[in-house]
Image (cartoon, rainbow, N blue to C red):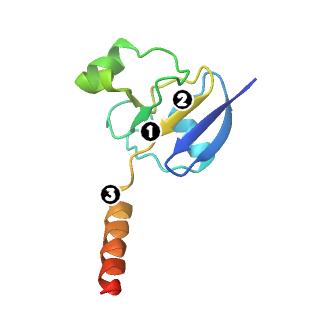
Amino acid sequence: MANEVIFLPDDVRVEVRKGTNLLDAARKAKVNVRSRCAGKAGCLMCKVKVNEQSNLLPMTKAERLKLGSLANQNIRLACQAIINGNVEVQVPEDPLKAAVRAQLARQKEEDLW
């Protein structure tokens, strides 16, 4: 049975099977979740925020230790978060994309004057 994963803020949706991790689901959906360790929880770059009602398997002890205080804020490592039902995920904006967006907003504001 397929489970729906929704990646915000772009509202990209993909269906995956139970047991898939969020990083693989993101790749299938062509959503960029930063990672350097090929899903081994070594780089800690693939942090995402999950909706409280999202259906993921519980955090492993290792993931909880790696995340520290972030573990209590609905932050998960996409490579370690295993899908067990429908999930809604907030993906952090890429820093370069954020900088470009901010610059374009400034230019638009300046163009108004």
Q: Residue at x 35, y 84 (%)?
A: 112
Residue type indicated by callout 2:
Asn
Which residue lies most toward the left here? 69
Amino acid marked by disc 1? Ala
Q: Earlier in the sequence, mark 1 or mark 3?
A: 1
For residue 4, above or below residue 82: below
For this orientation, the residue located farthest to the right is 1
Q: Are marks 1 and 3 in contact (CB under 8 Å)?
A: no
Under mark 3, the amino acid is Pro
* Along the viewing direction, whichever of 60 and 43 lies nearer the viewer: 60
| Residue 95: assigned label | 3
Q: At 35% across and 61% down in the image, what residue appears?
A: 98
Q: CA distance from mark 2 to mark 3?
A: 24 Å
Identify the element where label 1 is drawn.
loop
Residue placed under numbered mark 2 in the picture: 21
Describe residue 3's horizontal placement relative to residue 38 as left or right.
Answer: right
Q: Nearer the viewer, mark 2 or mark 3?
A: 3
Which residue carries the number 1 mark? 38
Q: CA distance from mark 1 to mark 3?
A: 20 Å
